[in-house]
Amino acid sequence: NAGVTQTPKFRILKIGQSMTLQCTQDMNHNYMYWYRQDPGMGLKLIYYSVGAGITDKGEVPNGYNVSRSTTEDFPLRLELAAPSQTSVYFCASSYSSLAGIYNEQFFGPGTRLTVL
Amino acid sequence: AQSVTQPDIHITVSEGASLELRCNYSYGATPYLFWYVQSPGQGLQLLLKYFSGDTLVQGIKGFEAEFKRSQSSFNLRKPSVHWSDAAEYFCAVGGATNKLIFGTGTLLAVQP
């Protein structure tokens, strides 16, 4: 199993450009998450998904969009990049049964994004 | 409000010395507690987790943590630190919503 994979690893954007960060997991997890990590701030949840076709906002969703058309993929879209979106972005996945048993999240290696 | 506090931003210990990283949480329901480690330029790796049962949990790489409900704490410990333990450590709390709240992290440096 590759686990959680993210592409690209690095990207530099100009203000106003758009891009999609890709995330794929091969563990058949139903939950997927996007976080951003800024120095000294820990990880903040941007969006999450409980299954294909279902997404919801996290703590810092402004400026981002997501979709979940398959179990495996959970892309994050930046429409109009701003310097405040310079960060490291992590995708994660986990499995939760219908009984509500919660398991740990598995993280991808991250995407380092700079907006100039 | 739900939150996680890691009061130590940066800790330096000598190789072979013991280690304790502090974590306090505020959570309105039964918490699920986690410690993750992040090496430079890498993603997060789970060290250990507490869901229920025995309040002393063992993890990978010789780490352990103790859940103290009365103190709302989940401190991470290791009896003898190795140079390879230098990394950033994150405490996190979650629950039935399956969403995690992370602390701001503790950066561990290990002196030879």
Image: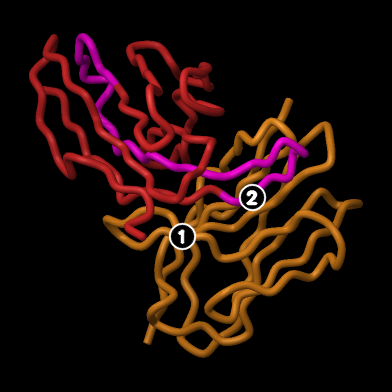
Chain colours: A red, B orange
Choose top left, top right, bottom left or bottom right for residue A81.
top left
Above or below, B58 relative to A88: below
Residue A17: % across, % down: 11, 13
Give the extent of the magenta segment. A77-104
Whether marks 1 and 2 lie on the same chain? no
Image quarter (top left, top right, bottom left or bottom right) of the C terminus of chain B:
bottom left
Residue B79: % across, % down: 63, 84
Can residue A9 be found in the magenta stretch? no
Above or below, A39 relative to A34: below
Residue appearing at x 47%, y 45% in the figure: A28
Tell me which chain the residue with mark 1 is part of: B
Can residue A89 be found in the magenta stretch? yes
Determine the secondary structure under disc 1.
strand
Residue B69 horizontal side relative to residue A101, left or right: right
Residue B36 horizontal side relative to residue B96, left or right: left
Q: What amino acid type should be assigned to the residue bearing mark 2?
A: Asn
Determine the secondary structure under disc 2.
loop
Q: What amino acid type should be assigned to the residue bearing mark 1?
A: Gln
Above or below, A74 relative to B62: above
Residue A16: % across, % down: 13, 9
Residue A25 horizontal side relative to residue B28, left or right: left
Q: Which mark's residue is nearer the viewer, 1 or 2? A: 2
Q: Look at mark 1 in the image and give the residue it sits on.
A: B45
Q: Look at mark 2 in the image and give the residue it sits on.
A: A103
Image quarter (top left, top right, bottom left or bottom right) of the N terminus of chain B:
top right
Residue appearing at x 63%, y 54% in the figure: B34
Residue B96: % across, % down: 74, 35
For the residue pair A44 and A77, the one nearer the viewer reads as A77
Tell me which chain the residue with mark 2 is part of: A
User: Callout 1: few (<14), some (14-19), or many (20+) C-alpha neighbours within 10 Å?
Assistant: some
Q: Residue lying furthest right in this view?
A: B70
